[in-house]
Amino acid sequence: MQTVETLNEGLKRAYTLTITAKDIDKKVDAELKRVAPQIKMPGFRPGKVPANLVRKMHGPALTQDALNTAIQEGIQTLIAEKQLRPAMQPSVELDEGYEIGKDAELKVELEVLPQVPAPAIDTLTLERLSVPVDDAAVDAQLQKFADQSKAWDDTKATYKAKSGDLVTVDFVGKTLDGVAFDGGTGEDMAVEIGSGRLIPGFEDQIIGVKAGEERQIKVTFPADYQAKELAGKDATFDLTVKSVKTAGESRIDEQLAKNLGLESLEQLRGLVKGQIEQEHNGLTRTHMKRKLLDQLAEGHDFDVPPSMVEAEFNQIWAQLEHEATHEADPDAAIKEMEAERDDYRKIAERRVRLGLLLSEIGQANGVEVSAQEMNRLIAQAAQQYGPEDRQRFIQYVQQEPMAAAQLRAPLYEDKVVDFLFEKAAITDRDATREELEAAIESEDGFATGTHTHDHDHDHKPKKKPAAKKAAAKADAPVEDAVEAPKKAAPKKAAAKPVAKDDDSAVVTDEPAPAKKASAKKAAPAKAEAAESEAAPKKAPAKKPAAKKTAKAEG
């Protein structure tokens, strides 16, 4: 194989590779010997078909396979001989004039990872904001559980429903011309008046109903409603009231704990306190990590591969476009995004640079993800699939290095961050949860990474919060019966370097642009399971079949 370098500019490299016809023919002969014993042909015993006949029948396919193999081996040889560290998969193009039996000339283009300067980690200083868990926070969470577990008392036939009551209805949804729409019919739906769980106007119009009463109400679907044929449209619901119940007293007592599958109120309080502590620790870590990344970004500036920045930017942009479709005015949201395109590209560049820095720090200090940890990651990820697909997913990750690298990256990044926390000089300060959340929110965006002061974050692009759906619960008639189940958003697959295996090339845990960090409240063990909704299972990614083509990508 002959190699000629045609470009060496910054991080870009280009080469012309010439694979001789003789080398290709040798691989054809080797492939012929491998497959000949498996070939069957009338008139010949299995494995006894003459080689010349096998070549005649399967020559083009064997030559194509040999050429693809030669291309792959040529690229790997190029990377090894030139000591290249590709940032992404090289672009490989076979000369259009190639003919079987002649030399193959390839054009190989790639970007290499930069030489990252030794990161300065001995001067890191961080403040750890800690939020003590007080009895008031525990009591507030217990009260929520008590309210969710409250009993409902029957009422007299003459009782009229008020806010806070539970009304059970059968319903039929219709368009204004009287035609029932698909999925708009249901029975025995329980509506807690004032909960805000249904589309605007629904709950207000059932105030005053009595058991046995029939009533028609008129509503307007939100403009950003998922079912496009109903979004922004007026509709009616014919209701038959089955019962009206008033809320019984909600109590924080031993019975509440037993209702949640626990042994005692003391055990419930301990569990709730532990979960709140876990929440606070998570917020504390998020704040510290962002401050850490800010310091790393301030102290290091080097060129990063444009292809990696482009890949990261495309993922950010796809996320923003998805969010824009849920805005009240999607066109205005997209227009606002377009005005800030350059800022989001800077965010992508910062993320890639920080990922390379963390990778360099991890490798220099022996940070690794063990085989046991990797197996645990794969097993956890496989749980999102149905039983019949889990093994396929596991095999796919085990066979595809890039898939394994994407799964490994977040844990590797966290381990590097933990290492840096141990190296940093940390001061502690107590704070309220509100103060900590405000500090985290003020840091969302990370446009350039050149400043960390709060006032500097005002210059970062801030996307307006997405319009909240008025009907957000599964027991809303239109949510439950009309909207299709929402698919879980695909997890971000950050672009990874192909020359490394155990590092993250893109920071995976920086906040998404202008997304407000929210603290998700966890319910106690068994109560939590009762409140969660099962997400639809998605089929595992299939391993792409190898293409038999004259063009190859290394």
Image (cartoon, grey):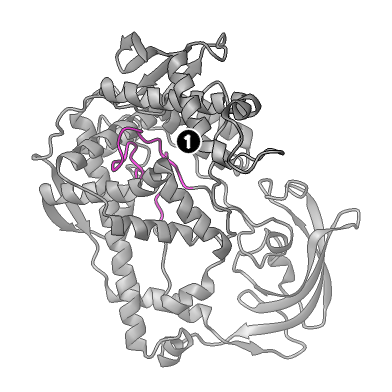
Q: Main secondary structure of the magenta part?
A: loop
The local crowd at label 1, few if under 14, some if 14 to 19, many if 20 or more residues have their Cα within 10 Å, is: some
Q: What is the x, y in percent for residue 6?
A: 36, 7
Q: What is the x, y in percent for residue 432?
A: 27, 60
Towards the viewer: 282 or 233: 282
Tell me the residue at 45%/23% (across/down): 26
In the displayed structure, does residue 177 sit left or right of residue 420?
right
In the displayed structure, does residue 477 sit left or right of residue 532?
right
Image quarter (top left, top right, bottom left or bottom right) of the N terminus: top left
Read off the residue under disc 1.
315
* Vertical arrangement, residue 276 with respect to residue 42, above or below: below
Residue 520 visible in this rendered orientation of the protein: yes
- SS of the residue under disc 1: helix
Tell me the residue at 44%/49% (across/down): 397
Towards the viewer: 62 or 164: 62
Residue type for callout 1:
Gln
Image quarter (top left, top right, bottom left or bottom right) of the C terminus: top left
Residue 498 covered by magenta stretch: yes
Count of labels shown?
Answer: 1
Q: What is the x, y in percent for residue 530?
A: 52, 75
Towards the viewer: 544 or 343: 544
**Residues shaded magenta:** 491-518
Q: What is the x, y in percent for residue 9?
A: 31, 11
* Vertical arrangement, residue 350 with respect to residue 94, above or below: below
Residue 545 visible in this rendered orientation of the protein: no
